[in-house]
Amino acid sequence: MRALVIGGNGFIGSHLVDRLVDDNWQVTVLDLYERRYDPIPESVRFIRGDLSQAYLIREALVGVDVVFHLAWATIHEVANQDPSADVNANLMPSLQLIETAHHANVKRFVFPSSGGTVYGPVKTLPIHETYPKRPINAYGVTKLAFEKYLHMYHHLHGFDYAVVRPSVPFGPRQNPLGRQGAPAIFMHRIAHEQPIAIWGDGRISR
């Protein structure tokens, strides 16, 4: 099987790539950056670029069976500051990716969405995937909108897809100096005897 992993040099993407390689997949990674902590496996084809470069996307999709779309240009805070820019940076190029993948006869499209923001405030725990989805920030809105577009393409064209909604993933290769990823950030600050920043009024919990 042949896979294109968009954002394959990031935290989650790099682990996915390693697993695919271990399972004898032929893997292409499209990413703006090199891996941060260790080299990419030798068998992996690396294309430097992003979703705005349509010609690179067409090239990367040739012969691909499965696309994993892990590239999202914003986080919650940034998306809320400029929702229209969030749409232009994420939703629009992702829609073009679906269209290009469909015409390239990709067999399946896998999209890691958001395990929390697509639901909004909840009244019961645990949250089942069928729980009503009422996002209250721009990040969750665009993630959910893209899920809906995937469903639309499946309905109109039989385009096969899967959505996963990871919630607060953590582990090796996570950037402890980034602006998201509470476990890694908290552990790094504790290890270096630094205070932990609290956002909002302190009532947020996981």
Image (tube, helix red, strand yellow):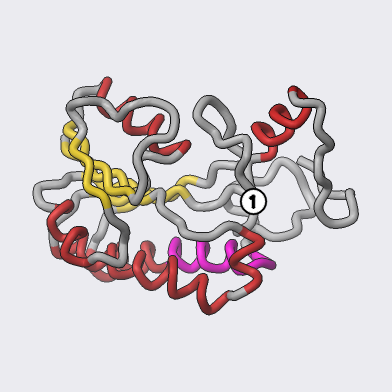
Rendered position, 24 above or below 77:
above
- Residue at 34%, 40% (x, y): give it: 34
Toward the viewer: 56 or 150?
56
Rendered position, 126 above or below 187:
below
Residue 87 coordinates in the image, percent (x, y): 48, 73
Residue 158 coordinates in the image, percent (x, y): 24, 61
- Residue at 45%, 37% (x, y): give it: 12
Toward the viewer: 122 or 195?
195
> For residue 38, what is the image quadrant?
top left
Main secondary structure found in the magenta portion: helix
Give the amino acid type for the residue marked by disc 1 in the picture.
Answer: Gly
Residue 42 coordinates in the image, percent (x, y): 20, 25
Is 144 magenta? The answer is: yes
Quadrant housing the N terminus: top left
Please give left or right for residue 99 compared with residue 191 in the image.
left
Please give left or right for residue 146 compared with residue 64 in the image.
right
Task: Give the structural element (helix, strand or loop) at label 1.
Answer: loop
Disc 1 designates what residue? 116
Rendered position, 186 above or below 55:
above
Residue 26 coordinates in the image, percent (x, y): 17, 33
- Residue at 32%, 32% (x, y): give it: 17
Residue 132, visible in the rendered structure: no
Is 109 magenta? The answer is: no
- Residue at 90%, 55% (x, y): give it: 201
| Number of marks drawn | 1
Disc 1 residue crowd, few under 14, some 14–19, many 20+, Cα 10 Å: some
In this view, which residue lies farthest toward the bottom? 84
The magenta stretch is 134-148
Residue 71, visible in the rendered structure: yes
